[in-house]
Image: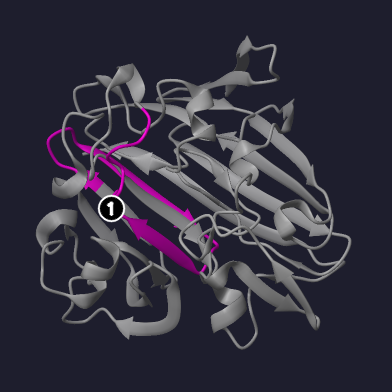
Amino acid sequence: MTETKILEKRENGIVIFEMKQKEIRVIVTNLGCTILSVFVPDRNGVYGDVVLGFEHIEDSKTDGSYFGALVGRIANRIGNAQFDLNGKHYTLAANNGKNHLHGGDSGFDQKLFDYEILADGIRFTCISPDGEEGYPGTLQVKVDYILTEHSLEINYCATADQDTIVNLTNHSYFNLSAGQEKIYHHQLYLNADQFGCVDDGCLATGELHEVEGTPFDFRQMHEIGEHIQDKDEQLKNAGGYDHTFVLNQGDEQIILYHEPSGRELHIHTSAPQVQLYSGNFLAGGANGKNGKPYENGDGVALETQLQPNSIHVEKEPSVILRKGQVFRSHTSYSFVVR
């Protein structure tokens, strides 16, 4: 049975919650639906916090790392911070060079969500008004965080009163060593035959390459750092991994394993792709937990989502949400030891 309680209510509207199950404890906040901590045991039964986060929650307003946050309306980048929909042109904030990233200057990661405590978790809701951050349509968003014995499940739902674009994900960075080492020796499995190419601004070009014979082949589990220094144009463009992978259907889609601790994360999703980001630009940001500045490679993000830059690179963009339609997506994060 999931135990959920409020740990703290602040005058600025921030609420901090604890969700607890038999072998997992999760701390979240209504500010950006942000996952602040995930405590799970290693093979010796010692609990550790396996996600990155800020020393102070409010630092998220000035730091662009998006630790643990819900990002939207559109996760990832939109080329040239603009798009056309139904013959109308829309201009967005260019907050990542010339491109638009993770919903803009004040995306969902900055929103204070309403909340409802459920029997097995928390429901967060918000209304994004027409024109917010340049997007058309009033969008109603519902995100459920459900805790089971070993897993955190996230269910996304959104509707709009006119045609718009939506691509929601969670931007947690994982480190299964609980911060004892960088993620380069974590082993990763991705059930994906293709990955998406990016330009030198990390913008998805829409071009898909086969992983066979490249540093992007994780169909056999191996260390994230094994090929990250290879001479490869795509690795050079992103300073490491910052690419989506087209997921195959199957019992196992994504596995992250840290051999010294025995902690293993299994991710299952209804989303067609996952963005692998190896924390290439973490250095120089706000202080992390316990006042420690993060360095590059201190965490790895595995962001389940639709095709990045979809509105520009897909003939029938998957991110378009028509009036009367419902956006739904589901991702589960299951923690085991071996």
In front here: 256 or 291? 291
Q: Which three-letter amino acid code belongs to the residue tagged 1?
A: Ser
Q: Which residues are magenta?
A: 257-286
Give me the residue at 45% from left, 43% from top. 64
Q: Mark 1 falls on what kind of element?
A: loop
The image's colouring method is one colour
Q: Is residue 142 visible?
A: yes
Could you tell me how many numbered marks the image carries? 1
- Residue bearing the label numbered 1: 278
Q: Is residue 268 magenta?
A: yes
Residue 273 in the image: state x and y as whole percent: 46, 67
In front here: 131 or 37? 131
Q: If the image is split into quadrants, where does the N terminus sit?
A: top right
Locate residue 274: give its quadrant: bottom left
Q: Is residue 12 above or below residue 203?
A: above
Q: If the image is split into quadrants, where does the C terminus sit?
A: top left
Locate residue 109: give its quadrant: top right
Give me the residue at 31% from left, 53% from top. 255
Give me the residue at 70% from left, 35% from top. 123
Residue 76 in the image: state x and y as whole percent: 50, 60
Q: Is residue 180 above or below residue 334?
A: above
Q: Is residue 219 visible?
A: no
Q: Is residue 243 above or below residue 205?
A: above
Residue 140 in the image: state x and y as whole percent: 80, 49
Residue 151 left/right relative to 4: left
Give me the residue at 31% from left, 18% from top. 291
Locate residue 325: give its quadrant: bottom right
Residue closest to the far bottom: 315
Residue 271 left/right relative to 122: left
Q: Is residue 251 magenta?
A: no
